[in-house]
Amino acid sequence: MLAGANRITSGDDYKMVVRRGVRVVGPHLVAYLRRNPDGEPVRFGFIVAKNVGNAVRRNRVRRRLKAASFDLLSSVRPGTDVVIRALPSANDVSWPELFSEVAGALARYQRQPVSPRVDPAPNPVNR
């Protein structure tokens, strides 16, 4: 189970990660990842909409996503916010396949170079 410090709880934080984060699309989920400028610990959030299935199925998918994120917590850079949106096909997928998809999304994001967001200096030639 994820600790409270490792969960995204604010709606504004969800919006910020989904709107400004890097999107990694898979066959059963969409992961949005963003560096948190505050340098907080790794935080996860989950979106499992009604199109995934009834309440029992949605909760099962959410529990699986939480378990996968807990197992992969140590492999994510500190200060990263992750929001995972389950697609309707996530309901029918096996645990190993779902786990590998979450791990792949996190690994794909980790391979990107970390660079601070800096505005480029104005070019005096193009004035």
Image: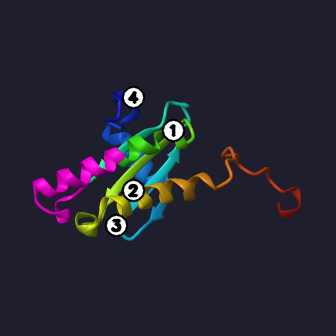
Q: Position of residue 55 (x, y in %)?
A: 11, 54
Name the residue: 27% across, 70% down. 89
Q: Assess whether mark 1 and mark 2 are in contact (beta carbons under 8 angstroms).
A: no
Which residue in the protein does label 2 denote?
99
Q: Position of residue 90 (x, y in %)?
A: 28, 64
Task: Name the amino acid type tagged 3.
Answer: His
Which residue in the protein does label 1 denote?
74
Of pointers 2 and 4, the one earlier in the residue sequence: 4
Q: Where 80 falls versus 103 (above or below)?
A: above
Q: Is residue 97 left or right of residue 121?
A: left
Could you tell me how far apart the alpha carbons at marks 3 and 2 are, in whole angstroms?
11 Å
From the image, give the main secondary structure of the stretch colored magenta.
Answer: helix
Task: Name the amino acid type tagged 2.
Answer: Phe
Q: Where 55 falls versus 74 (above or below)?
A: below
Which residue in the protein does label 3 denote?
28
Please tell me which residue lies in front, 97 or 104.
Answer: 97
- Of helix, strand and loop, which one carries label 3? loop
